[in-house]
Amino acid sequence: MNRHFLNLSDAGGDAIAAMISDAIDRKAARQGWPKGKADADAPLAGHTLGMIFEKNSTRTRASFEMAIKQLGGDSMFMASGQMQLGRGETIADTARVLSRYVDAIMIRTDDHAKIEELAHHATVPVINGLTDLSHPCQIVADLLTLVEHGKALPGLEVAWLGDGNNVLHSIIEAAGLMKFNVRIGVPQGYDCDASFIDAARAQGAQIMVTRDAMEAAAGADVIVTDTWVSMGQEHAHNKIAAMMPYQVDERLMAAAKPDAKFLHCLPAHRDEEVTGAVIDGPQSLIWDEAENRLHAQKSILLWCFGKL
Ligand code: CP
Ligand code: NVA
């Protein structure tokens, strides 16, 4: 039975807690080492990760390449436009063929149904490197970052400001699994998929949706935002105008707890979803968050290979 990682619930709360703990240990064990040197136990020696990108990426590509390298394995980068996939070969056939060459497949794509199809036909683990629906790898890194900075997850108040997008879906999913609460400030017409909210509430998380940005931020432990225009969406003026009241600025940060932290998965658009003063300010954890993509990917890979 393959361990696919298409959404956080494929792993579950206990496995995510194990990923965070393993990432903290591995990160500490290699402090000061050259980044390309393998961890002492090289647990994935001989394993190759195939990576298909149907959309652009900086962090996901670079962190997965280095993650498998640090675990003792190799990676293979494939841009879909240079593959037969890009001229009509089916996902199913691509899955069957790549499963004969590589030990796991990571894909960044648009329609989530494509990754489900890939996983259905692959005989190796498949990892979601972002779809239009969700971005689970990002949220493992975000949770790791919060834990590292002294925030216990159960009961944490996480405020999301802006678009109801793929990153928010994975945050809500994590809330149900790790028992924290989400306060969503989103304009009318840009709500997220209600099924994520229903599932998290059924698991005991409190999920609040408001049109009032200050109400979302009030008393929060963490403020999170993301680009207002995700990959594949149009940069529409009416969307930017609708999002403007949800911009994370110093006034909004002041409504949160005094020790509140700021997260953003990046890439950022300063003075759109967040002001420069906040994203480059003392409450921002964005560089640790970006670094932690690497440490989180290692734990995700280990879980997929049954080593966590
Ligand atoms: N946060 C994130 O997934 O970044 P990339 O698009 O650069 O991979
Ligand atoms: N919501 C963004 C995240 C980028 C990492 C997008 O899908 O483009």
Image (cartoon, rainbow, N blue to C red):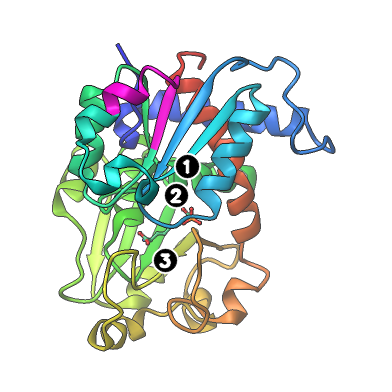
Secondary structure at numbered mark 1:
loop
Say whether residue 179 is magenta: no
Q: Are marks 2 and 1 in contact (CB under 8 Å)?
A: yes
Q: Is residue 201 above or below residue 68?
A: below
> Can residue 210 be seen at all in this image of the molecule?
yes
Q: Residue at x 35, y 73 (%)?
A: 228
Front residue of 32/96: it is 96
Does residue 228 appear to the left or right of 42 in the view shown?
left
Q: Residue at x 36, y 25 (%)?
A: 98
Measure the C-alpha gap from mark 2 to mark 1: 5 Å
Which residues are drawn in magenta?
Answer: 95-106
Q: Residue furthest right?
A: 32
Residue under label 1, please give it.
Answer: 153
Q: Earlier in the sequence, mark 2 or mark 3?
A: 2
| Secondary element at image label 2 | loop
From the top left corner, tell me how far across and down residue 65 is, in percent.
Answer: 58, 38
Residue bearing mark 2: 156
The residue singled out by tag 3 in the image is: 226
Query: Are there few (<14), some (14-19), or many (20+) residues within 10 Å of tag 3?
Result: many
Label 1 – label 3 distance at C-alpha? 21 Å
Q: Residue at x 53, y 81 (%)?
A: 275
Name the residue nearer the viewer: 99 or 12. Answer: 99
Q: Residues within 10 Å of mark 1 (few under 14, many from 20)?
A: some
**Residue 39 position within the rendered picture, expressed as x and y whole percent measured from the top left:** 72, 23
- 111, above or below 266, in the image: above
